[in-house]
Image (cartoon, rainbow, N blue to C red):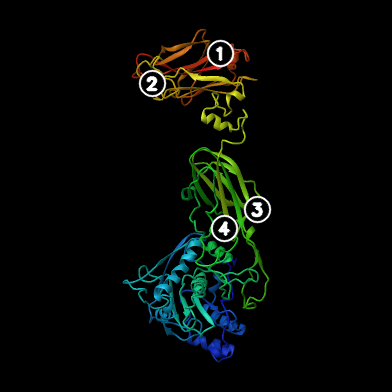
Amino acid sequence: MTQLSTPRTFLRALCSSVLSLAAVAGLQPAAAAQQMDLDIQPMQRGPIVVCYEEGTDPAYVDQVNNLVMLLNGTNYYVGNRWSGAQGSPRALSWSLAPDGVSIPGGIGEATAPNNLFAQMDTKFAASGGRATWIARIQASFDRWQQLTGLTFTRVQVAGQDWDDGAAWGSGGAAGARGDIRISMHAIDGGNGVLAYTEFPSGGDMVIDSAEGWGSSTNQHRFFRNTFMHELGHAFAIEHVCSNNSAQLMEPFLDTSFDGPQHDDVRACQRLYGDFHEADNTAATANDLGTIASGTTLSNSCTMPTPPTGVNPANTSICSIDADAELDFWKFTVTASSAVSVTLTPLGFTYDNTQQTQANPNCTQANSTTNSLTAADLKLELLASNGTTVLATAPTQPAGTAESVTNINVSAGVVYIRVSEVNAPSTTQNYRLSITVQNNCSGAPDCNGNGVRDSCDIANGTSLDNNGNATPDECENFIGSSFCAGDQQDIFFLPCPCDNPGTIGHGCANSTNAAGALLAVTGQTDPVDTIHLNASGMPTTASAIFLKGNANATGGLPFGDGVRCVDGALIRLGTLTSVGGACSYPTGSQASVSVRGGTAMGSGQVAFYQTYYRNAASTFCPPETFNVTNGFTITW
């Protein structure tokens, strides 16, 4: 792809066979340049690019190029885009100039009135007339919009097909005329210069009225490819020479394909970003919607099919266009899933020699680019907050696909972040493939039942009472919650002042209507790593962890709650909660089995509960304490 930010000191031409210089001006090169300098008004807003039909006399190309360089001056080769930051989207307007507007001779032809409507209505008379040729122009803008971060709006005035008819070169005006204006008059006769166009922030186009634009082959591809090529210049894309890949922006018209090709797409995405811009943050991520389990989504970067023919190979509407560029994507899964993502760079090696004064007809090949390795892409899978990294693909060499495989995600939104690990200065096309599978197959499957452990636990076919994501039957842990203050059991003692908690918790307290919860983590075998974890208590409540060897079935009134731990009671330890939570043992405290006198492997059943201070004077008076649910463990 042409490096558009590098100043140039020469002009590129487009297209094909041209008449001899003598037939145009009847002058030698020096005299011709001098004469044109006297007779032609220089472009006021931007440089121009001239396009020729294929097969044009090389000497003629040289002479016209030399002339246009005199007109364009030193600003032509900067390659500046329309206003905005590199790689950011841009909205542009376009309009058709009405017949009669005076069009100066941009490359040495005589000043003449615009005759776009009269000429094109006649040339398309057999193909539907004005509606058809305007539709072909609209399709040309649409094609560029499908592939890049550009969007277009047509400007018409007073219900007519044309703009306000202001003087040529007056620039765009909201509601009056487009940023890009289109006109036609005689340039140099048929089979010569096809058209020329100003670079930004000009963008105006002059088409040669002498050409056979009415050819209907492939939906008027001769006209559309010429027009889309000229639009490339209006966007600030210069010419590129290639002897091994056909590109729309080569200096000679090619109708063997339809519209922008690989290098053309990369060039415009470099300037204005890809079709999905702006997507540089999680908040503006491209939403792929819900991806059902058992589904692979791989078309999010696929180019829409052109009006005729096929898409260029190794090209997409997704790209990283510069150093530090980020692309965010998001999708939704409706259940816990295993997600796999593959990020595949696209490109190939091709000739992209510059068209210089020494190489005006692209006969020399001296530069190649490998668009497959323009950027060393990076792939990350992010959690629903758009920041937590769930998985990062191993960094493969540039040009190699990156993948993350079978990453467990929870139901909800999942994000993908695409970036680069090098500092690219040109565009890297890529595609994404996303597969969502039910994550209930595969490892870990500790009980060998063919179902992933997490699904066993979620489906209730295995218990995980110690909360370590491993089914209890795989680690000799036998235990369960009991003695809940949720009043779901009509045979169980209700909470003392009609203060039930959430299902599975203790009775509600003064700061937490859900009630406090006792949960257990760790294992009983082969080493006691059990922790009794109390939460949901008042912020700095004093808590006593209690063990008993009996269960008071039906419960006993206990402060503002219900106690079930009974028999020989042992106070394991007293802790002060932090943020309403604390855990036994903490620090140097003895293990649960040692402090409670319950030997591992003994088969003894022990009952645990935590009671805590809750001294709020207006809550369930006159008591000043409450209690969690209970938990039973078989040692």
- Work out how far the residue at label 1 is from the one at label 4, CA to CA, in angstroms: 65 Å
Q: What element carries label 1?
A: strand
Q: Nearer the viewer, mark 2 or mark 4?
A: 2
Decide if residue 365 is on the left or right side of residue 267: right
Q: At label 2, which amino acid type do we have?
A: Pro
Q: At label 1, which amino acid type do we have?
A: Val
Q: Mark 3 points at which residue?
A: 400
Q: Which of marks 2 and 4 is nearer the N terminus?
A: 4
Q: Residue furthest front?
A: 126
Residue 227 rendering spot, x and y as whole percentages: 49, 73
Q: Is residue 285 visible?
A: no
Q: Where on the picture, by quarter, is residue 99?
A: bottom left
Q: Mark 1 points at which residue?
A: 605
Q: Where on the picture, by quarter, is residue 592?
A: top right
Q: Which mark is residue 322?
A: 4
- Work out how far the residue at label 2 is from the one at label 1, CA to CA, in angstroms: 27 Å
- Work out how far the residue at label 2 is from the one at label 4, CA to CA, in angstroms: 59 Å
Q: Earlier in the sequence, mark 3 or mark 1?
A: 3
Q: Residue 500 carries which label?
A: 2
Q: Where on the picture, by quarter, is residue 428?
A: bottom right
Label 3: how many Cα within 10 Å (few below 14, some 14–19, many 20+): some
In this rendering, is residue 381 above or below 201?
above
